[in-house]
Image: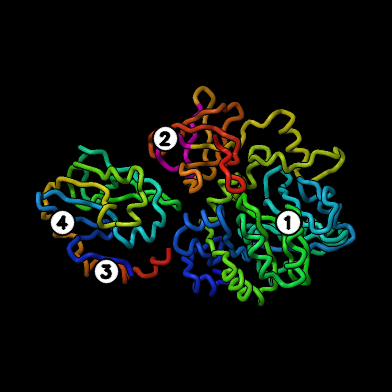
């Protein structure tokens, strides 16, 4: 069954090429993926991310519940609207999903999870929530639009509802605020500044037009993928899944080990893995020869072993191919990648290629 | 609607061929193909001097989205590839039938080109597969 977001007709109207994504009819681009990529890096672009799943969690024990459910610690969230990125692990330490959780009030947190993992996430969260008496409510009636780019915030502020337009400009990075049924957060998935805006779906088409009129151009899922990969952000299902721990997925930084007495699902397994040293790591690769990295290409590290590319693409900003790859822990600063039978040279780098419009690669 | 010049011949896998005055054959991909692939960022041309049979995968064109094989339209030996594409692969998007040509071959039998689709048959082919146009 294929689903459409409330903005589907807008995508057609703006010339979007529609593809299936996790059962949703979504725009892959509106003409040129590369132009849309540059639009976000240099000015302002917008993405319909209404297929993503918004969950509201209510209950007196919602904080201890999330401290048990998530590998990162929501106790870090002191300010209303503050966001936290976390993995949700299974009992074996594999990643069920990666998500963002917002602290709204002591008895209310809001979570945004991936569309492709919706059913299993809701089933898992609801099951774990029962003993904590936490209510899990899906907010399917909310649309979500991400506006991203160095000029995205100033342009969006011109057309946000009046209460939001007056104060959303003061939001710090990774902080959101509710304005009635609207929620504006200074977050994103591109490595650029911007907002992710949740709003009632009935108001979304008109707001999309207003954003476009303010000079924020529609961008498709294609550009979203090259932007997030340049920013070194993981994609669930490609760079990590239930069979991989966060430690071998470049997500060790999202695990809150302190306080030591906090018991979260999967902790014992990944703690043991950490103690003995993970056998693999997720790194960035930059192709030094001509070609394009793609997922599942084999990585060869001379004298060490083999690995695999988890996400690869051509980087429109760097004009060369980049990738995330899972490789043996002992991998140094060079490796080779098998592209159609040829071993091409690649440099191993910290997996952040572009941030705030600037190259992070020498 | 994509451009389909009447003087060229076409394959169902969206290559075009042009028979030159000297009997060699120039090969590229159609306007429809470049449109479907999106922004092209890399071309791995067939090696000059290699012989391929018709319908052999002989070359790879990569867009930001994905890698796609290019198939030999008629049997022959590769005699040249388009050097412009090394630094400007986007030429295939900009001018698929002119500066965006991909390689030239010396055909085993130039008459094989006559068996390929003419422009109106190729156009019909595209219309029949209209559902794929949104890919």
Within-10-Å neighbours for mark 3: few <14, some 14–19, many 20+: some
Q: Position of residue A142 (x, y in %)?
A: 69, 70
Q: Secondary structure at mark 3?
A: helix
**Side of A24 where A320 appears, left or right:** left
User: What residue is at 72 percent from the left and 47 percent from the top?
Assistant: A89
Quarter of image, res B128: bottom left
Residue pointed to by mark 2: A289
Badge number at residue B123: 3
Residue pointed to by mark 1: A124
Which of label 1 and label 4 is nearer to you? 4
**Side of A142 where A239 appears, left or right:** left
Q: CA distance from mark 1 to mark 2?
A: 44 Å
**Chain ID at mark 3:** B
Task: Name above or below for residue A98 compared with residue A288.
Answer: below
Q: CA distance from mark 4 to mark 2?
A: 36 Å
Q: CA distance from mark 3 to mark 1?
A: 51 Å
Which of label 1 and label 2 is nearer to you? 2
Is tag 4's residue or tag 3's residue first in the polypeptide sequence?
A: 4
Give the position of the C terminus of chain A as an image quadrant: top right
Residue pointed to by mark 4: B113
Residue A123 visible in rendering: no
């Amino acid at each position: 069954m294929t689903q459409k977001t409330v903005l589907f007709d807008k995508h057609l109207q703006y010339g979007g090429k529609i593809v299936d994504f996790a059962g949703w009819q979504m725009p892959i681009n509106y003409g040129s993926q590369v132009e849309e990529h540059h639009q976000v890096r240099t000015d302002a672009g917008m993405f319909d991310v209404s297929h993503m799943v918004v969950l509201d969690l209510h209950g007196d024990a919602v904080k201890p519940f999330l401290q048990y459910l998530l590998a990162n610690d929501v106790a870090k969230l002191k300010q209303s609207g503050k966001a936290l990125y976390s993995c949700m692990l299974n009992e074996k330490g594999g990643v069920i999903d990666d998500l963002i959780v917002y602290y709204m009030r002591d008895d209310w947190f809001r979570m945004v999870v991936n569309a492709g993992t919706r059913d299993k996430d809701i089933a898992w969260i609801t099951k774990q929530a029962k003993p904590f008496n936490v209510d899990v409510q899906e907010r399917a009636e909310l649309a979500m639009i991400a506006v991203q780019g160095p000029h995205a915030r100033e342009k969006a502020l011109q057309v946000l509802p009046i209460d939001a337009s007056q104060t959303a400009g003061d939001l710090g990075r990774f902080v959101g605020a509710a304005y009635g049924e609207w929620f504006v957060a200074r977050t994103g998935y591109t490595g650029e500044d911007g907002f992710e805006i949740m709003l009632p779906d009935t108001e979304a088409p008109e707001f999309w037009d207003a954003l476009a009129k303010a000079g924020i151009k529609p961008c498709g899922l294609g550009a979203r993928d090259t932007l997030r990969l340049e920013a070194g952000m993981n994609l669930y299902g490609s760079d990590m899944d239930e069979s991989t721990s966060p430690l071998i997925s470049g997500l060790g930084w999202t695990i809150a080990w302190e306080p030591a007495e906090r018991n979260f699902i999967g902790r014992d397994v990944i703690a043991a893995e950490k103690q003995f040293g993970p056998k693999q790591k997720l790194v960035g690769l930059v192709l030094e020869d001509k070609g394009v990295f793609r997922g599942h290409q084999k990585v060869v590290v001379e004298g060490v072993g083999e690995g695999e590319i988890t996400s690869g693409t051509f980087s429109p900003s760097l004009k060369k191919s980049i990738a995330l790859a899972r490789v043996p822990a002992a991998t140094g600063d060079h490796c080779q990648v098998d592209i159609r039978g040829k071993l091409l040279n690649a440099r191993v780098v910290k997996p952040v290629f572009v941030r705030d419009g600037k190259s992070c690669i020498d | 609607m994509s451009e389909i010049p009447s003087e060229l011949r076409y394959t169902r896998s969206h290559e075009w061929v042009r028979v030159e005055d000297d009997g060699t054959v120039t090969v590229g991909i159609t306007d429809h193909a470049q449109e479907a692939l999106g922004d092209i960022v890399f071309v791995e041309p067939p090696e000059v001097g290699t012989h391929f049979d018709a319908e052999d995968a002989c070359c790879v064109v990569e867009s930001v989205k994905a890698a796609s094989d290019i198939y030999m339209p008629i049997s022959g030996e590769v005699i040249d590839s388009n050097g412009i594409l090394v630094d400007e692969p986007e030429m295939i998007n900009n001018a698929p039938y002119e500066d965006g040509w991909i390689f030239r071959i010396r055909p085993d039998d130039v008459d094989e080109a006559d068996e390929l689709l003419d422009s109106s048959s190729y156009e019909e082919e595209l219309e029949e597969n209209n559902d794929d146009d949104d890919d």
